[in-house]
Image: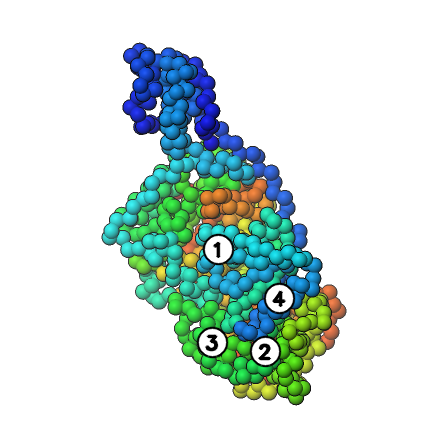
Amino acid sequence: MSVVADAASGRETNQVSGESKCARDTCENPVSSLQCPTCLKYGKSSFFCSQDCFKRAWPTHKLIHKELAALQPHDPFPDYAYTGSVRPVYPLSPTRLIPANVPLPDHAKDGIPVAEQRIFRSTNVYINTPEEIQCLREACALGRKILDAAAAMVKPGITTDAIDELVHKMTVEAGAYPSPLNYYKFPKSLCTSVNEVVCHGIPDLRKLQDGDIVNLDISLYYKGHHADLNETYYVGKAKEDSDNVRLVETTREALDKAIAIVKPGMPFREIGNVIEKFAKENGCSTIRTYCGHGTNKLFHCPPNIPHYAKNKTPGVAKPGMTFTIEPMLALGTWKEKTWPDNWTSVTIDGKRSAQFEHMLLVTETGCEVLTARLPNSPGGPVARI
Amino acid sequence: MDDDDEVPDLVEVQSFPADSKIASTASNATAEQDIQEFKVPITIVTGYLGAGKSTLLNKIMKRTNKKIAVIMNEFGDSIDIEKSLTVSEGEKNYTEWLEVGNGCLCCSVKDMGIAALESLMERKGRFDYILLETTGLADPGPIANMFWLDSALASSIYLDGIIVVVDAVNILKNLDDTFVDQHHGNDQDTNSTLQKDSTHAELRATSTANIQLSYADVVILNKSDLIDDVTKSAIEQRIHSINALAKIIPTTYAELDKIEDILDLETVDNDVKRWQDTIVSDPQSFHDHRISTVTLDLPSLSKSGYEHFDKWLQNLLWEGYVDLHPVEIHRLKAKICLNSGEVYVIQGVRDTYDIIPINETASASGKIVLIGKGLDLAILQSSLKCVEI
């Protein structure tokens, strides 16, 4: 683990070499083999001539440690009682920039989606015009292309931040805005949810490990419309574990089964009945806090679509509506909690959770999956073990 | 993190230790104690400014030793980050602050104010009761629905009832005011079906007093010492015609005989007993677009009849139509008896309804009580015919 720290004084960068002088500014003694234990912990060498000299240097020397700590990959919440083994690895990379030519959704500036808040708790579902549907199709096709490119990067050793970098670059190069960025201040351009993370994981410096499962959730704003889709992928040998496969494939199939009932006249509440029943049959629980939602000119709008059974959600599907279904299933409890980053949702028992999401258009006879997989899309179903 | 004050001893090393990563001090997650075995009732208290809401709340707090939390005003307008509530415990009163998350809750089913309330109780111990006082002009419908969570969400809070405090001196005048109502039910949807809005425009002309009364489980007819008996009985009749389900309690200075009359109302069984004998003696609402109560009998249903009935309900509550006539349902209660012997109770607030099986032997017929605008008994009866197959 190496860190290049440009410390305050030039002298602090002394190295193990014959001519080096003691790290204390005004000391002219050659170094001994003694070095600061804290710097060492951060992977930096600070040699002093003696304990006494080190003691005198301490008031200024210790300031370096703060800088080193911030740059060092670290857990930002060391005292937090994590529920599983996944840890955030900070620092987050600097906020990525949006070129001036990319049209912005209203939350881009200050994080507040004003238009969404205006219809807060309404249950009226918007019917898209044919022109709007065309824009939604294009946005979703772009979303699929970017998700597939991101998925192709998934392998052990890749950081989720590296995936974020690619997703951000591809999105803005296509003239689109990555919808998660600054949405209620979310810091990155996609959500990456590993293992026990249910959803809304923040891309960071954690490297994907052989055996992880990771969900990539892409949303973008293109031609005035949002697209929203996600898939869970196996990292390396993860697909050799029967529980992983049961979880991931059950979630994938639960979404397919829910999509199969979508047609005009279908009460939205039925979707949860289909998903939870199938989840139970396969020994999985259904996460309840987060639900599917309308997506059109607004990122999140009516209807709310819970994935659990026996919900009271009002309304029926009608041609021209667009919404997501995005079940999150878990191997253990359905209960989740949020990390102190205010975003990352994890199962409270630390057991794994998977998610799949499609965006649907209700047609006259059924529905069209706007974010459907392509023949060459990475990932896809694997046989149960 | 760093031991700033004490100078550590230098260490002698020839090379870096192999493992130089920062050890996380995180303790292993103790499986979170199984949350929320308890359920705390919440009662919504609404009514015009000056009707006596605050007086009533103070009286309730003084009369009981329960630990009661009182939330004021704009709780539902969840955009504010900081919210406070007053806790009353015996003689003590103090303020608690809710930590309302700033996260994205648009794709979360639970209102963030409720989540904050739950987490406050997890940290600081439960309340025995929560009272929510709305602003004078609030429409209680959306607030009620916010607290009427799916049982699957296992919330530690449940909606117990809605109390409407009215000023006996002014209520008749207030009922006849037809100003405002711009604020109607938060349904102003710039991004949505304007068509529905305009068809329903004729249903709009109603004062807030009507709307508030339509949701009431209990009406506190306050300042009743200031009116004569004739006026009082006229008022009671008028309130009954709007909401035949509500219990009307005349008070002076919001002084109640029994607090049990207004709190802890809503166990389903209790509730059925309370309303199933409701009779609207004078269904005077013919072609009247004001708010009224209508009751309908429903025969015992076959399986397919029940499915038809559910479609009829969806049309009524979700589309706002009965046989092409616009309606707006504020509250609904129904008892459904199936030929197969099951009995269900249906409760509805606005577009949300729930079907709960109850332990009761099926009687010959069920019943529906509707409170809302545009209710025409004849039209409703004829439209229900299709169900009775």
* Camera-side residue of B285 and A73: A73
Could you tell which of marks 4 and 3 lies nearer the N-terminus? 4
Mark toward the viewer: 3 or 1: 1
Residue B167 is marked as: 2
* Camera-side residue of B388 and A185: A185
The Cα atoms of the two marked residues, 2 and 1, are separated by 32 Å
In what element is the residue under mark 3? loop
Q: Residue at x 27, y 53 (%)?
A: A102
Residue type highlighted by circle 2 = Asp
Please state the horizontal and vertical placement of residue A4, each as a whole percent of the image: 33, 27
Do the CB atoms of the residues marked 3 and 1 lie less than 8 Å apart? no
Asked if labels 3 and 1 share a chain, the reply is yes
Identify the residue position indicated by label 3 in the image. B181
Identify the residue position indicated by label 4 in the image. B57
* Camera-side residue of B159 and A126: B159
Could you tell which of marks 2 and 3 lies nearer the N-terminus? 2
Pinpoint the chain carrying mark 2: B
Asked if labels 2 and 1 share a chain, the reply is yes
Mark toward the viewer: 4 or 3: 4
Q: Residue at x 57, y 83 (%)?
A: B172
Identify the residue position indicated by label 1 in the image. B82
Q: Is residue A339 above or below residue B266?
A: above
